[in-house]
Image (tube, rainbow, N blue to C red):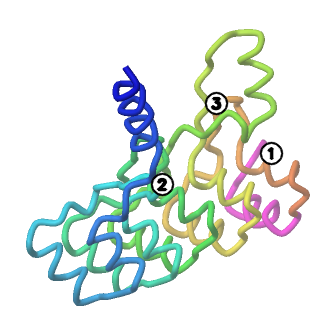
Amino acid sequence: MVGVVAMERMRDVMATTPQPPSPLMTATLRKDLSAVKVLLANGANPYETTPPFSVPIVHSCSRENLDVTRVFLDSGFDPNWQGNEGIPVLAAMVQQGVLECVALLIERGGNPNLRYPIRYRDSVPVLNRIRTEGNVPYERNVLHQAVVRGSLDIVELLLIKGAEPNVRDTNGETPLTWAKKTRRPDIVQALANVGGTE
């Protein structure tokens, strides 16, 4: 009986112990361009995640390693791909404010009008709706994210690349509405200059 209990405890410990990063993730974190190339050429899966890590391209982008990011994109990685949490790589980089990577992802096919779900903790109005209406999904697009983050340079880039200035989130709010809420007159002006409305 003691052996069974010990085995169950060991299984629980193993289930909660983080796995080591994959070789591709390790090469990405080390900014080892040649290793990333070799691994991808030999079949490494660029979409593979090893908790607590996301896909390797997120880490190359967030560390502003554009050379490694280009290798992933050259291998066919989809910049609009949404992982298990539903957060696209492009949205993650907008959220982190990595302008050069956002520009590269859009240049390589990233959609400046991409909609995606956000976590409920990010939105008080959505939490209030969930309390009264049940499980209400909340979506916005990358332009909303750039506005909420206060990244004027990314807002301007997205608009130049074709982002719709009057897109509405699940609550019916436009990027201009969010710019006013976050008290960013520079972003309000940038949106108004391209026809943004509330």
Q: Amino acid at mark 2?
A: Pro
Query: At 79% across and 48% down in the image, what residue appears?
Result: 178
Gap between marks 2 and 1 measured at Cα? 35 Å
Ranked by sequence position, the earlier of labels 2 and 3 is 2
Q: Secondary structure at mark 3?
A: loop
Q: Is residue 165 left or right of residue 161?
A: right
Mark 1 sits on what residue? Answer: 177
Ranked by sequence position, the earlier of labels 2 and 1 is 2
Query: At 52% across and 79% down in the image, what residue appears?
Result: 63
Q: Which quadrant: the C terminus?
A: top right
Q: Secondary structure at mark 2?
A: loop
Q: Position of residue 81 (x, y in %)?
A: 35, 51
Q: Amino acid at mark 3?
A: Thr
Report the residue that reaches farthest toward the top.
Answer: 133
Question: Taking 162 as reference, is 67 above or below it?
Answer: below
Ranked by sequence position, the earlier of labels 3 and 1 is 3
Residues rendered magenta in the picture = 185-198
